[in-house]
Image (spheres, rainbow, N blue to C red):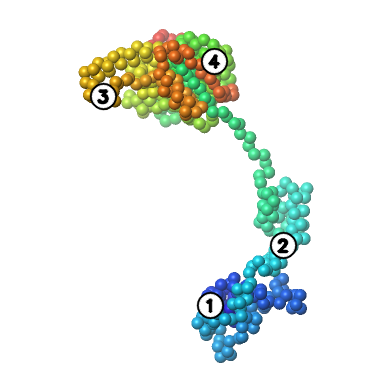
Amino acid sequence: MLAASATLAPVIGVAAACRQLGVPRSAYYRARRAVAPTPADGAPAQAGGSTDGPVAAHGHAPVLPATALASPPPADVSPADVSPADVSDPSLPAAEACADASPADVSPAERRSPRALSPTERSQIWATLNSERFADCTPREVYATLLDAGIYLCSWSTMYRMLRTTGEVTRRRDPPRRTAYAKPELLATGPNQLWSWDITKLKGPVTWTYYYLYVIIDVYSRYVVGWMIAERESADLAETFIAETTAKEGIPPGQLTLHADRGSAMTSTSVSQLLVDLGIIKSHSRPSVSDDNPFSEAQFKTVKYHPTFPDRFGSLEDARAWARPFFAWYNHDHHHTGIGLLTPATVHRGQAPVVRAARQATLDAAYQAHPERFVRGQPQPPALPPAVWINPPAASAAAQQTEQEPAGDQTAASLPPPVAVSRGNSGAALDTATGGGTYAASGSPAGGPPDAAPK
């Protein structure tokens, strides 16, 4: 087979000959290297650095002389008449040469491509790329500059490959320095220890018209301690809103932690200074992490999924007229799953033990009447969680605290106050213009008469 491929290779090329006869080209080349003469033996080297036989036409690889592998075929047999069956003798000398030869026996100099750069050329390219003139230039820029000067060293892709071998293909500018924000870990064991506030948009009468709903919610009791609807998101309005809400609830300095996201009003200098003056610890969510402010986000979902929530509000007064009865329902009539199916007002005002005792008495009477209906024994009303976390530090610790049953107000008073692990930085207010009616915790417009908002 190898002899036949050596006969056909000068005519149709090595690749075509090996493909037609079913001979692996690797076996052909190994046999060619094993029997080819070297310059040390007195044979002249071929052009291009090859020490093998003649080069075939059409750019094919050098072919192996048939006499080096086996006796030539008869004169009456042409290359076109050669078939695999005619040259399938495994006893050819080339088979033994092919079996004895391996790539490891070939020196690197013999495997070197004739297109490869010489060590001298590579050294010149290295010196050029790392010179003071081109140290801060890309390979494309170096290539174009040298080409304009009448100098050609290599292609810019070769320059990239050389630089990549030494790890020099990197961004030359400094990487962005991102601030590491710690996860806020906040704990509330009673009302008025941890508040969360946020602002959401309400669609106005026409496209691109919005009203802004400000809401402050107590994390422990889920009670909305204050709400406001205005025509814009403003740091000055937020400052007034927070001040009136804390005054209504009678918050002493050092007791409250106020958590919010990183909106312009939340991080404004005026709001930050107000919190310092009131002795309130501020906390902010991490950037682009909505889970850090889950209670405000969940409350807004309750607002916008309520059956009475309209698609659009006709005016600012229309939005306020809808919000007053809604927040009254939310605080006093809505039984919240997260607080043992109690209303937020019941928990916020400390009436949870009385309500739970009444529920227990009702369940006891039902159990005494039909004990067979309660397969799990004495029924218990849903428990009120003793503590509420924003990002608990460990699931096991939070589960252990949840399993503890509070003993009225004494248990909540014995637990530590909320701890703000992460505090945000103050920012500049984007909008300091005031406008629209301001509704504080009492639900009355600033400077106006009281209305029917929740108290």
Residue 111 marker: none
Looking at the figure, which quarter contains the N terminus?
A: bottom right
The image shows residue 336 at horizontal and vertical percentages of 36, 22
| Disc 3 residue type (three-letter) | Phe
| Disc 2 residue type (three-letter) | Leu
User: Which residue does the image show at 61% across and 83% down from the upper left?
Assistant: 70
Mark sitting earlier along the chain (2/4): 2
Looking at the figure, which quarter contains the C terminus?
A: top left
- In this view of the protein, can residue 398 be seen by the observer? yes
Mark sitting earlier along the chain (1/2): 1
Is residue 393 shown above or below 35?
above
| Disc 4 residue type (three-letter) | Ile
Q: Foreground residue, 401 or 68?
A: 401
Residue 280 marker: 4
In terms of secondary structure, where does tag 3 sit?
A: loop
The image shows residue 388 at horizontal and vertical percentages of 45, 22
Question: Real-space Cα distance between discs 4 and 1?
Answer: 89 Å
In terms of secondary structure, where does tag 1 sit?
A: helix
Question: Real-space Cα distance between discs 1 and 3?
Answer: 87 Å
Mark sitting earlier along the chain (2/3): 2
Look at mark 2 in the image and give the residue it sits on. Answer: 117
Question: Real-space Cα distance between discs 2 and 3?
Answer: 88 Å
Mark sitting earlier along the chain (4/1): 1
Mark sitting earlier along the chain (4/3): 4
Look at mark 3 in the image and give the residue it sits on. Answer: 374
Look at mark 1 in the image and give the residue it sits on. Answer: 21
In terms of secondary structure, where does tag 4 sit?
A: loop
Question: Real-space Cα distance between discs 1 and 2?
Answer: 36 Å
* Dots 1, 2 in contact, CB < 8 A: no
Classify residue 366 by image quadrant.
top left
